[in-house]
Amino acid sequence: MTDIFSRPIVIDTNVLFEGLTKQGSAADLIVSAWLAGLLNVYVSNGLAYEYESTLSNKLSPTRWQQTKPILRRILSHVQFVPIYYSWRPLSPDPSDEHVIDCALNANATVITANVRDFRKAKEEVGLSVLSPVEFVNQLMSS
């Protein structure tokens, strides 16, 4: 059995956003573990750009300026994965396709608050998908 901390994962933008904005949530625990360098996180260039775009658009200008160094630190704890293959379309939400591509190219589990949009990828190509609560429960039980 693979150690949960070494399991390759892709963290969806909704988990990163929640983890940076809601203390005490499962997403907050995941982001804290990520910042501590405890997780094996994979990111594609497209996903890194989405992190930045989402945070800069959803946070106030002051909060975004405070968050930029945190995002840089977070991204220093990732492995960038090139996208060689794409399996589109596998999600009802086109903005989730690059998350799926990243996870499949990295052979990683997706951690997302939006598990429903990844159902087709899970069924058709065997993508592993967990909610933040499910992932934290696995962390706690390992």
Image (cartoon, rainbow, N blue to C red):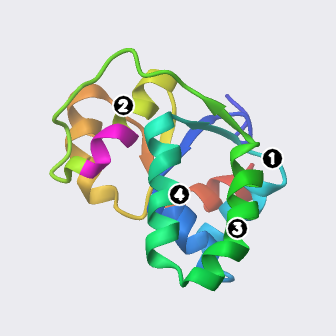
Residue 53 is situated, as x and y percent measured from the top left of the image, at 46, 60
**Horizontally, is 43 left or right of 95 in the view?**
right
Q: Which image quarter: residue 100?
A: top left
Foreground pick, 127 / 72:
72
Q: What mark, if any, has residue 38 been given in the picture?
A: 1
Q: Is residue 47 above or below residue 115?
A: above
Residue at image location 67% in from the left, 61% down from the top = 30
Q: Which residue is mark 4?
A: 52
Tell me the kind of residue under disc 2. Answer: Asp
**Badge 4 or badge 3: first in the primary sequence:** 3
Distance from label 2 to label 4 (Cα)?
Answer: 19 Å
Disc 1 residue type?
Leu
How far apart marks 1 and 2 lie (CA) works out to 23 Å
Query: Residue 84, labelled with which disc?
Result: none
Q: Which residue is mark 3?
A: 29
| Residue carrying label 2 | 101
Evaluate whether residue 92 shows in this view: yes
Label 2, label 3: how far apart the Cα atoms are: 25 Å
Question: Helix or strand or loop: what does disc 2 sit on?
Answer: helix
